[in-house]
Structure formats: C-alpha cells, structure tokens
Amino acid sequence: MCVCTLISWSFGVSLSIRMLGIKKTLPVIVLALLLLAMDYINFYSPSSWENDGPSGGRMISLFCTYYHAVSISLFFLTINLFSYSCQSRFLSFFRTFLFSIFFVFSLSVIGNRLLSGSGLNGDSMVAILQTNREEAYHYFFGLNNGFLLLFWLFLVILALCLFIHFAFAPFKDRIKRLRLLSKAAACCCVIVLLPCVAMGIKASMYHFFAPRMYKVMIYPTYYSRDLKMFHKNREDYVKKIQERLSSINTNDCFSGKYVVVVGESLNRNFMGCYGYHKNTTPFQSNLKKNDNFVLFKNCFACHVQTPRVLLLLLTNLNQYNEKGYEISDATSIIDIANLYQYQTEWASGQEKIAIANSAISALAESANRSYYSTEKTPYRDLDVVQHLNKDNILGEERSLTFVHLNGNHYPYHLSFPADLAFEEQDFSLYEKSVVFNDTILSKLYDLVQSNNVDVLLYVSDHADAVSVQKGHDPRDYLQEMAEIPLWIYFSDSYRKKHPEIVERLRGASEQVITNDLVFDLLLYMMGMDNEFVDTTLVPGSDNYRVNEKNARTLYGQKPIYINGIQSTP
C-alpha cells in the first residue's frame, strides 16, 4: 500500500505541476515533507530503533509513517485540484483551512521538540490532562522555553500567511482539462485509501496502523474511558473482592490506627536526614535518632508522574507481578481496608479539579471520607493538618488515613508561605520548600502522637531533577527523578505488640524498594494475611525478591543504578 500510494502521489504531483505549475503544487509537496519531518523529529531518539522491537516491526512503522504522510498529501492534492477546477469558494476555504491546520500543528510539534528536547507522547498527554492553570503557566514559561515557543509560533503563523498568499492565488485557465484531472486524482486517492480502511476495519487493526501522532493525541480519551469503566463497574468490582475474601475472617488483622503520608516531588538528595549538607529537615533528622523510626535509604519511585505512581502505590499492581497496569485489573488497599472494618479517609492538599479525571480520584472515592483543601497553594497542607485535627477518624479503633500533600510541587516559590522565616539565608527555592514540608511533617507527627496512632508512613510519589533544573518529565527521564524518601515511625505500643515486624523492617533499611510495593508493606504491617499480600515483595521478608539487580522504574522501562550496579529486567 505504501508503494502504491507513493506511485499514485508521484503521478498526481507530476500532473498537477504540468497543469497548475510548481507554485500551486508546492503546498502538496510541503505538506508531505512536513508530516514526515514531524513524525521523525518528534518520535526519534538515539534508542528509538532499539526499542521498536524486531526489524520487521521497525519496517512496518516506517512504511506506516510514509503511507500516512503521502495519503494525507494525496487527499489534499485532490481537494486542491477540485478547488481550482470548480472555482468553488467553499473548497478554496476548506483547502486553505486544512493546510493551515497541518502546517501550524506540524511546525509547532517540531518546534517543541527542538526547543524543549522532548517530543509529545502518551505521558505528556497524561501530564496535560492532570495539570492546573497555575502549574501549566509556570511549567510552560519556567521549564519549557515558553517564550521561545511563542516566538516560534509567531514565525510559523507569519510563514503560513506568506505561503498562502504565494501559493493559493486564484487560477482561471484550463478549467476543462483541470476538471478531468481532478476526477482522475480523486480516483487515485479513493483507490489507495479505501483498501486500507477496509483492511483495517476487517482485521480490527486500524489502531496499529494509525499515525503515531494520532495515537498520542487521542491517548487521553482511552485514559478517561478506562476510568469511566472503573466507575461504572465499581459495584461488581467490590463484590469480587468480597468473594475473594469470603473465606477470610476480616477480624483476623491488627486493630490500630495507620496514617500514610504521600509527599509530592520530594528529592531525598536535598534532605538533611539523608545526608544533605544543609539542614533542610531539622524535624526528620531529629526523629531519625528515635528507635521507633526506620529510614529506607534506597527507595525509588515506580514512575515519575503522580497518577501513574498512585495507581500502583494504592493497589496490588506493581512492576514485578506481571499483572499489567490497567485500573480495571487493580485491587485497592482502601477497599480491602473497608472490608476489614477499617474507617478510611483520603485528605488531599492538592487541587481537586487537577486530579478529578485520574486514577487518584477513582481510587480515593472508595474511602469512607474524603477532604480536598480549597485554600491557596502555600497553605493547603496546613489546612489538611487542621482538618485532621478537627476530624475524629483518628479516634476510631481501626482507621487508615491517607494524606496527599501538595508538598514540593512546582513552582517551588508557591509551595511555602512568602513570609516564612528560615534559619539559613542561602536556601534555594526548592530547599525552602523542603524545609516547609518538614514543618508540615512535624505537625502531622504531633497529631499522630496526640491520637496514639500506631504507624506513620511517609513516602514521596516521585522526585524532581532539581540538580539539573528539570522537573519530572518521563520523556527526559533522569534517575534523580525517582530518588525519593521513605520512612516509617512506629508507636511504642505497636513496637511492643509486634517487635518482629519492626525489627525485620529495621534490618531492611538498606534494601532496595520501589514505592509500588507500599501496598504489600501496608497490608503486612496491618496484619492482613490474605491472597492479596505477596510476602516476596515485603522488605525484610526471608524471600524478598527485589534487589539492585532487578529493581525498575517507569513501569519497568528503566533500570535503576545503585552503587554503580545497573538493574536488569
């Protein structure tokens, strides 16, 4: 099909040049070249050929790229010939509009890749879907060469105007011959396109043959569809969990109060308790001296985007059990806790609208209670602490509370109050956000102590590559984006009741762990012995199977380097 389309396109272009001249045929040629350049520049990377699979798959991908670019150009050629032969204003407008869309979009994608160094992909579309206006503004102008991109867009639009003026001038000669030519070109277009569409529908493989950029742009629709299906089938999903736990005595677990704090964008390399040369974590550094405190030194994020991390952190899906990463296949720890008669709550310092259409909201809504702060950015986490102080869930005999902090979210200068005083004057904006986050954790600790909470666990979703002034874009992944803190504080009563658990975890502080294993770790600490618990994924267990040789991140796509050792699949 690729070869036939190319022959048809060459035939149509040669006839168009003969009848219309090179100037009026130039848009057809430019459109094909732009689409090819956009696909190559946006998706090309030094490792792209290595990751495309066998050579046969690479050839199919290459042929599909050429086929789509040439087919769209051939379709445009047909419209172009019809517009000149029929002298139709509607066709002329449609032709110009169609060309403008492809022209601006292609050059915008190319400019984004050249200026930012990262092309558009599914991860970037998820990030766009989850962001809010404040974050988007600062990311675009702070980290993504926003002003240069706007200047590039201005040049593109200027070039478009000049090109339209140059190439789409009226043409009134040889109308009869052009009508015949347009019909022939239309036949060429139909002969090539219809077999492809028919084959794709029949074989149910159209998505495979679809343009890569098309797949990227519609990715959010698949993401949203899976979430809607999860919401729709929620009752059946809970019933299945009940059936799977029907043989288990739901009273056969530890009664107690558990608080899980999920940080945001915290890089452990900038924390004093992890050896950073500045005292950015005075509270945590002091808590580190407590015998009830366990600090995990080699914890990494399973991904560098919050929705993708929490989908695994809150469920039985992970990078090591080969169950995939679809929310429809996930079992939430909140739902399991509910069945064990725990009172559950989700308290978030992040803007609700930013996570409304994500796995976070889908999983968090199963909690008995939920709270989303409506305060301004620097005060959201303080507001969550105040809410928990007023709430009585920590007074329950069995409770599981998740606190999702705004933490060290970019832009950093908005993650702490502007009037906050610091002991050291040479703190960077990120370091100041780390200090303020430490203050929030100290307030949560006081709250935990006053309510006799048994276990307080803190883990960040991912980090930011602060040392090289980058955020957490998976398209430009650096391991620093995955180097996160994880620590657990046990109450005196919990330590007396379950000394073997505390000692096992204390002995595992040097072991490698990724935060998609928090699910198994929590169930283990809560004493829930059921089919959802995989002890081989609990640090400190005799058969723990995650180590520096097999630990992964980015949903298994990237290895982790520890002490110069690279993990392998």
Image (cartoon, rainbow, N blue to C red):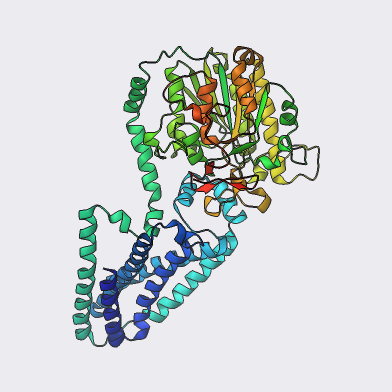
* Depth order, front residue of 517/55: 55
Q: Residue at x 45, y 15 (%)?
A: 341
Instruction: Measuring from the top left, give residue 343's x and y in whole percent.
Output: 49, 18
Query: On screen, 317 above or below 10?
Result: above
Instruction: Measuring from the top left, give residue 106's x and y in whole percent.
Output: 43, 66
**Which quarter of the figure has residue 212?**
bottom left
Q: Residue at x 52, y 71 (%)?
A: 155
* Depth order, front residue of 88/408: 408
Instruction: Measuring from the top left, give residue 390's x and y in whole percent.
Output: 60, 19
The N terminus lies in quadrant: bottom left
Whether residue 453 is visible, yes or no, is no
Query: On screen, 491 above or below 512?
Result: above
Query: On screen, 118 above or below 503?
Result: below
Residue at the farthest front position = 542
55 on left or right of 387: left
173 on left or right of 495: left
* Depth order, front residue of 25/566: 566
**Which quarter of the figure has residue 316?**
top left
Whether residue 348 is visible, yes or no, is yes
Instruction: Measuring from the top left, give residue 518's x and y in whole percent.
Output: 53, 30
Q: Number of labelled discs?
A: 0
Q: Residue at x 70, y 31 (%)?
A: 439
* Depth order, front residue of 244/327: 244
290 on left or right of 126: right
